[in-house]
Image: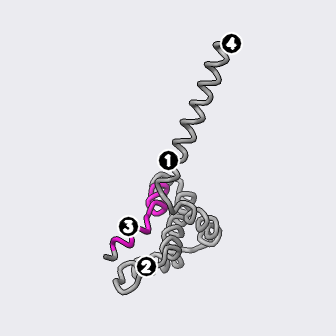
């Protein structure tokens, strides 16, 4: 009987700790949901980009970001950053020797924050 109580208690604590960690991690970025929706929406489109299309996207993003008279909406901002992240992922699949670098770059673009972007506009 005592062994059964220990097992139940351990199981309860394990799931409670796992659930608390999962909620804490999800709460670190309030925009994760929109990023995932855009990632799903644009993945096939961006994987079909050639270098010229990607360069146009990349330069358009930086042009709009630097323009002090213009502020991107949250969806526009994340559309650019997620598309760039997807293209980085594509490069990792194409060039196996650069897979780690491509993954790191993808994560950097995926982790961009709209709040940080707005603060840079001030």
Q: Nearer the viewer, residue 121 or 49?
A: 121
Residue identified by numbered label 4 = 1
Residue identified by numbered label 1 = 24
Residue 107 is labelled as none
**10 Å neighbourhood of mark 3: few (<14), some, or many (≥20)?**
few
Task: Give the mark nearer the N terminus: 2 vs 3.
Answer: 2
Residue identified by numbered label 2 = 59
Query: Residue 55 location, x and y as percent?
Result: 47, 76
Task: Give the mark nearer the N terminus: 4 vs 3.
Answer: 4
Q: Which of 9 and 85 is in front in this view?
A: 9
Q: Nearer the viewer, residue 46 or 96?
A: 46
Residue at 31% of width from left, 76% of height from top? Answer: 122
Q: Are marks 4 and 1 in contact (CB under 8 Å)?
A: no
Q: Quadrant of residue 19?
A: top right
Secondary structure mainly formed by the magenta segment: helix
Name the image quarter holding the N terminus: top right
Task: Give the mark nearer the N terminus: 2 vs 4.
Answer: 4
Task: Give the mark nearer the N terminus: 4 vs 1.
Answer: 4
Residue 109 within the magenta-colored segment of the rendering: yes
> In the image, which is nearer the foreground, mark 4 or mark 1?
4
Task: Give the mark nearer the N terminus: 2 vs 1.
Answer: 1
Q: Are marks 4 and 3 in contact (CB under 8 Å)?
A: no
- What segment is highlighted magenta in the picture? 102-120
> In the image, which is nearer the foreground, mark 2 or mark 3?
3
> In the image, which is nearer the foreground, mark 2 or mark 1?
1
């Amino acid at each position: 009987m005592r062994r059964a109580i220990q097992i139940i208690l351990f199981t309860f604590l394990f799931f409670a700790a796992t659930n608390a960690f999962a909620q804490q991690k999800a709460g670190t970025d309030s925009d994760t949901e929109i990023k995932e929706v855009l990632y799903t929406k644009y993945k096939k489109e961006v994987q079909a980009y050639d270098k010229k299309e990607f360069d146009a996207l990349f330069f358009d993003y930086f042009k709009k970001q630097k323009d002090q008279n213009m502020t991107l909406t949250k969806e526009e901002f994340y559309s650019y950053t997620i598309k760039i992240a997807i293209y980085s992922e594509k490069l990792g699949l194409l060039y196996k020797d650069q897979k780690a670098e491509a993954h790191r770059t993808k994560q950097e673009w995926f982790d961009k924050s709209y709040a940080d972007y707005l603060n840079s506009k001030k």
